[in-house]
């Protein structure tokens, strides 16, 4: 039998909403009456400082581009204005990225590379926290990558950005113009659980995606297929592809071949 909501329940929910609104944006929403401000301040500071610290840990480069006041203003703008789609604390960084991307799409004043940098930093967090276990993936680490069927690591992510996000820092900010060529990167967590990246090109990213989407094909077949996409002699692509496969294997993007 369903419980019947009472006026007291509605009053309590209203109190919770008003209290939460105050914590998120104290300047716009006064605290509910009857609560000592000294007590409310404890929650205001605790919640917001946790958010500021969490974002700084997830986005260290982005944080380094702001002074303390500027960083807190950015955190407050997100905290007060974004309705998160997850109750999970570790996922709040993803919500921050979504907010920045949405703000950019609405004609915000952030630099064009701002949201891209946040996404890149968040993907490093994703790589570090992903629960996939390389050792649990069946593969032959010494297999022939050309004639065998290469196995792509479950903790490798091909990514494309308009800006060279991996080189951004406080003393090396991008210019105002969008680069003519995109930046292709692969973020990967290696067998030692270290997260890193390697610079790539569109052909290499296509190769990784092709091998992941079609695990039954050999390295040679994958490279030959790419040759058809770019209208280049397949033998040339295969010859160059041997080095690409070896490089991906050396960085644990490829684990080896199917047994």
Image (spheres, helix red, strand yellow):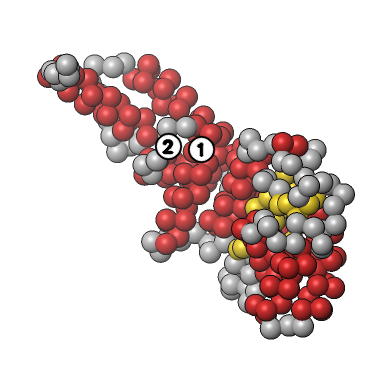
Q: Position of residue 61 (x, y in %)?
A: 65, 48
Q: Which residue is mark 2?
A: 86
Front one among 128 and 65: 128
38 vs 98, nearest the viewer: 98
Q: Is residue 148 visible?
A: yes
Q: Nearer the viewer, residue 137 or 161?
A: 137
Quadrant in which residue 24 is drawn: top left
Residue 101 in picture, x, y percent from top left: 47, 56
| Disc 1: CA contacts within 10 A as few (<14), some (14-19) or many (>=20) | some
Q: Residue at x 60, y 63 (%)?
A: 161
List the residue tagged with mark 1. Answer: 91
- Determine whether label 1 and label 2 are within 8 Å by CB: yes
In this view, 227 is above or below 253: below
Q: Secondary structure at mark 1?
A: helix
Residue at coordinates 59% horizontally, 46% vertically from top-left?
122
Left or right of 82, for residue 232: right
Please, is residue 244 above or below residue 45 in the view? below
Give the image quarter of residue 5: top left
Query: x and y percent of residue 97 in the render?
Result: 50, 49
């Amino acid at each position: 039998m369903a419980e019947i909501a009472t006026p007291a329940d509605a009053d309590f929910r209203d109190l919770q909403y008003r209290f939460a609104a105050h914590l998120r944006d104290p300047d716009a929403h006064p605290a509910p009456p009857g609560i000592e401000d000294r007590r409310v301040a404890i929650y205001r500071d605790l919640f917001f400082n946790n958010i500021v610290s969490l974002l700084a840990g997830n986005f260290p480069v982005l944080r380094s581009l702001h002074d303390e006041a500027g960083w807190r203003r950015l955190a407050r703008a997100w905290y007060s204005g974004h309705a998160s789609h997850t109750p999970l604390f570790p996922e709040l960084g993803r919500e921050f990225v979504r907010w920045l991307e949405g703000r950019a799409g609405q004609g915000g004043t952030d630099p064009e590379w701002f949201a891209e940098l946040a996404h890149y930093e968040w993907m490093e967090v994703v790589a570090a926290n992903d629960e996939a276990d390389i050792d649990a993936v069946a593969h032959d680490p010494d297999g022939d990558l050309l004639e065998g069927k290469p196995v792509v690591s479950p903790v490798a992510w091909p990514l494309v950005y308009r800006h060279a996000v991996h080189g951004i820092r406080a003393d090396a900010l991008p210019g105002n113009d969008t680069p003519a060529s995109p930046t292709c990167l692969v973020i990967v967590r290696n067998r030692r659980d270290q997260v890193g990246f390697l610079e790539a090109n569109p052909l290499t990213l296509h190769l990784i995606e092709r091998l992941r989407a079609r695990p039954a094909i050999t390295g040679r077949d994958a490279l030959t297929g790419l040759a058809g996409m770019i209208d280049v002699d397949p033998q040339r692509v295969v010859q160059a592809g041997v080095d690409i496969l070896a490089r991906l294997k050396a960085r644990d993007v490829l684990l080896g071949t199917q047994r």
